[in-house]
Image (cartoon, rainbow, N blue to C red):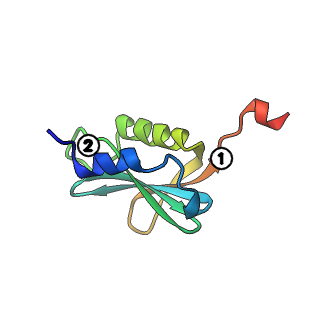
Amino acid sequence: MLPPLRELLNRLRPPHLWWLGRPYRVTIISTASGAYLQIHHTQGTEWVQLPARAGSGDRSDDRERAAAAAALGSRGLTWTLPWQLDSHGDLTAEVTPLTRREDTR
């Protein structure tokens, strides 16, 4: 059986979308079809699907935040605290590139 189209597209897409520019903000969005991580870049927006929420509530859970951290980590990013609510009531935070100690030498 063929995997869903979205999964195939995610496999074909390069891990870093350099043409979207520098990432500056991340938002966790809840929709009727699931939860998504929206990474805002200077030239566009990248959407990453997160695992389904365990309960029927609108609050994000630990699995969702862990998946968001893993998605950002795979792109060499991390969020900076504090998380805030945007005008739509979604969690949003600024992002910054991860720096390793070896990179600063």
What x and y, as percent, mark residue 93?
Answer: 54, 54
Q: Which mark is residue 105?
A: none
Label 2: how many Cα within 10 Å (few below 14, some 14–19, many 20+): some
Residue furthest to the right in view is: 105
Residue bearing mark 2: 52
Image position, residue 37 (x, y; %): 41, 52
Using residue 48 as the reference point, say whether residue 74 is left or right of it: right
Kindly identify the residue that appears in the image at 77 percent across and 36 percent down.
103
Left or right: 62 as drawn, with respect to 58: right
Residue at 47%, 63% in the rendered image: 45
Which residue was labeled with disc 1?
97
Name the outermost residue toward the left.
1
- Give the spatial CA distance, label 1 vs label 2: 27 Å
> Horizontal and vertical percent for residue 12?
39, 48
Confirm or deny contact between disc 1 and disc 2 (CB under 8 A). no
Q: Amino acid at mark 2?
A: Ala
Please name the amino acid that badge 1 sits on: Pro
| Relative to 63, residue 21 above or below | below
Q: Is residue 89 placed above or below 54 in the rendered structure?
A: below
